[in-house]
Image (cartoon, rainbow, N blue to C red):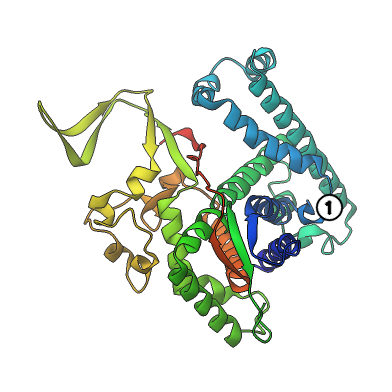
């Protein structure tokens, strides 16, 4: 929590610097600040590494992380072939296929992934040397409590987890902890500095966009945050912040309407028949189940599920933070069915054993950054028209 609080201060300082160049409200591209915040958080908490993104220091590792994301977007439809390519031949054969692929976007992706792998391996070697030397690493970034360091120090895992596996874990942490949150925290908005009342001092994207278009909701949220911090000024890590009902309602509602993972893919492990909770009426009759053959790749549309009126009611497409406040989970939805989502019955973070392992990390990060920004700034829609593109973040195909 202290790491998130410090990062929230950094992104507020970033917005303040952007505003300092103008005497009036101005458009601020919050994407840059959101990117820096999420990379710094996952670096420190995930593997004890300081990216120092807000200090304008050139960091090749950070550049490669962002290049991987951009390259995945560039390859477009080819991304749907990845589950099949992954099953072809040996690892050496698959690498040869990538090395010779006649697509510039694929080559950019290959080079970025290779460089990211090399940097992660370098960080791990440095951390291994520190642990082996027996020196006190409590003063290092992460204080020796980051995930990778704890894994490396755990008895019984030192020999069972090799470096390649740890490098893979690092890259998974980055993808899960950076891209999904950054999407929820990105956008271009008009920001106004607010005069701090007394000792008060403040993700962005979809969340701030909705708040910018719903000034009443933004004001209500700001009032809740100011009241909380007035009463808890001496609380260093502000854990109670996570339990604020209106803040929680705003975050849940935006994650319901705009899930960062828009598509989840699953591979059918055996021939089965999929029953439909809501039968489909067709000219030839009613379809109440769908046969699915073994090996079929199934694409699950999270946005459609999260906005289904038979589940969420007639106003399923509306931004209503109040739907979550003062209600039990089964009172939020309009169905008696057991819903599979691992986060508030939504499919935003997936379902079952393949659900996202970083739910708490993402929600804590988003709430902390929102709290910092809303307390310090007033947000309005940008003067330039912004077009939101559909997110192309996939949860990998798995056998479930």
Specify whether 331 is left or right of 227: left
Which residue is located at x 87 percent, y 47 percent?
Answer: 129
Which residue is located at x 35 percent, y 49 percent?
Answer: 306
Measured as percent of width and height from the top left, residue 222 is found at 53, 75
Camera-side residue of 59 and 19: 19
Q: Is residue 4 above or below residue 198?
A: above
In the picture, the quarter occupied by the N terminus is: bottom right
Measured as percent of width and height from the top left, residue 195 is found at 66, 79
Q: Is residue 137 above or below residue 398?
A: below
Q: Is residue 161 visible?
A: no
Q: Is residue 271 above or below residue 150?
A: above
Measured as percent of width and height from the top left, residue 123 is found at 81, 44
Measured as percent of width and height from the top left, residue 212 is found at 50, 62
Camera-side residue of 160 and 120: 120
Locate residue 95: give its quadrant.
top right
Disc 1 element = helix
In the picture, the quarter occupied by the C terminus is: top left
Which residue is located at x 44 percent, y 38 percent?
Answer: 263
Camera-side residue of 310 and 124: 310
Marks counted in the figure total 1
Q: Is residue 214 above or below residue 314?
A: below
Specify whether 337 is left or right of 20: left
Q: Residues within 10 Å of mark 1 (few under 14, many from 20)?
A: some
Label 1 sits on residue? 131
Specify whether 358 is left or right of 325: right
Q: Is residue 300 visible?
A: yes
Locate residue 228: give its quadrant.
bottom right
């Amino acid at each position: 929590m202290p790491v998130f609080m410090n990062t929230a201060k950094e992104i507020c300082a970033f917005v303040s610097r952007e505003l300092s160049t103008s005497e009036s409200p101005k458009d601020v591209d919050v994407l840059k600040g959101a990117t820096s915040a999420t990379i710094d958080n996952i670096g420190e908490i995930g593997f004890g590494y300081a990216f120092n993104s807000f200090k304008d220091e050139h960091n090749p590792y950070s550049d490669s992380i962002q290049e991987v994301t951009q390259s995945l977007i560039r390859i477009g439809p080819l991304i749907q072939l990845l589950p099949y390519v992954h099953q072809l031949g040996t690892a050496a054969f698959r690498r040869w296929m990538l090395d010779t692929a006649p697509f510039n976007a694929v080559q950019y992706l290959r080079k970025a992934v290779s460089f990211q792998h090399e940097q992660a391996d370098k960080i791990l070697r440095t951390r291994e040397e520190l642990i082996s030397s027996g020196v006190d690493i409590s003063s290092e970034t992460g204080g020796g409590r980051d995930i990778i360091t704890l894994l490396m120090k755990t008895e019984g895992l030192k020999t069972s987890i090799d470096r390649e596996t740890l490098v893979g874990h690092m890259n998974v942490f980055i993808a899960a902890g950076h891209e999904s949150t950054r999407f929820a925290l990105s956008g271009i908005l008009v920001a106004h500095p607010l005069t701090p009342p007394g000792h008060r001092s403040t993700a962005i994207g979809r969340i701030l966009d909705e708040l910018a278009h719903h000034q009443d909701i933004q004001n209500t949220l700001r009032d809740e945050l100011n009241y909380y911090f007035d009463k808890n000024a001496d609380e260093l890590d502000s854990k109670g912040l996570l339990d604020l009902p209106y803040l929680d309602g705003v975050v849940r509602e935006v994650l319901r309407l705009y899930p960062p993972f828009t598509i989840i893919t699953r591979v059918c492990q055996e021939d089965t028949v999929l029953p439909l909770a809501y039968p489909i009426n067709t000219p030839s009759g009613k379809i109440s189940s769908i046969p699915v053959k073994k090996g079929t790749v199934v694409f699950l549309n999270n946005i459609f599920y999260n906005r289904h009126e038979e589940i969420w009611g007639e106003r399923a497409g509306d931004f209503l933070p109040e739907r979550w406040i003062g209600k039990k989970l089964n009172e939020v939805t309009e169905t008696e069915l057991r819903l599979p989502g691992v986060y508030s019955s939504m499919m935003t973070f997936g379902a079952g054993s393949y659900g996202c392992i970083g739910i708490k990390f993402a929600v804590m990060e988003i709430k902390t950054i929102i709290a910092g920004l809303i307390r310090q700034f007033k947000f309005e829609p940008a003067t330039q028209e912004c077009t939101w593109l559909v997110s192309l973040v996939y949860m990998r195909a798995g056998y479930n």
